[in-house]
Amino acid sequence: MSENAEKSRNLPSFQDAARVFVLIPCAGQGARAGLPAVDGVAGLPKQYQPIAGTPMIIHTVQAFRALGPVLAGLWLVISPDDTDFEDVFPGFNAEGEHLLRAGGATRAASVHNGLRALLTTPGAATANDWVLVHDAARCLITPAQIQALIAACRDDAVGGLLAQPLADTLKSEQRDANGVRVRATLDRAGKWLAQTPQMFRIGLLLQALEQAEQSGLIVTDESSAVEALGLSPQLVRGSALNLKITYPEDFALAEAIVLSRQG
């Protein structure tokens, strides 16, 4: 028996009736996107910026909407003081969609708050149900990629994530008075770039995030929190086009991809 299978013996057994929910943390400001201020006032957060004429968050949500009854519900976590969402996305709150003003100081905090709401809202989710956590800024995700992740992970004891094998030469850095320079070239074999969605049982993921917080571990995605429990999530190959809009030049690339998909 593999080490991962041995550790998984203590996890709740999979139930065929387990449902699949979606949780999208949408409370960030996107500082690295370099969005300009207008008259000294910061513009809309990155996830509300238009891509091919449509706000980024709408592109993201529409990919999950396309799955229809495959999903039991979609929860979107925004900042408590967000005054833009309703204007940006007036069509949100269709059947099964829930807006939660419980965004935290970090992405992990927003996800944690969202999971708590899923479990404590009457008639929502149970600890054995699955949750797909997806970055609002990965607006190029496709329904086919989401379905592939669900199909790969539904019978897995741990869960998994979309990821892409590293194709480029990998460098580590060193900083000195002359700037940022190469410290070494690292072996790229067996290395993957983590993407989202990431799919885990709600109870397991909540336990992982709470333990990470208690231990002071900084987690940048759900998988790293689950890994800290000693488990090995499944890597499900995604697509290089499932990029996270992070830097200014990413907007033009995303728009070109959206327009190409529109024909």
Image (cartoon, rainbow, N blue to C red):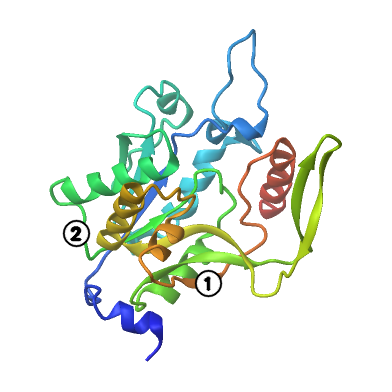
Disc 1 or 2, which lies upstream in sequence? 2
Name the side, left or right, on which 177 lies relative to 193.
right
The N terminus sits in image quarter: bottom left
The percent coordinates of residue 108 (x first, y second) are 40, 45
Which quadrant of the figure has residue 153?
Answer: bottom left
Tag 1 residue: 236
Task: Farthest residue to the bottom: give it.
Answer: 1
Going by the picture, which residue comes out furthest to the top?
39
Residue corresponding to mark 2: 126
Q: Nearer the viewer, residue 103 or 125?
A: 103
Q: Quadrant of residue 66?
A: bottom left
SS at badge 1 = strand
| Mark 2: secondary structure | loop
Residue 133, x across and y down, in percent? 41, 54
User: Which quadrant would residue 107 be assigned to in this image?
Assistant: top left
Judge whether residue 168 can be spotted in this image: no
At label 1, the amino acid type is: Val
User: Is residue 38 positioned above or below 222 on the image?
Assistant: above
Q: Is residue 88 visible?
A: yes
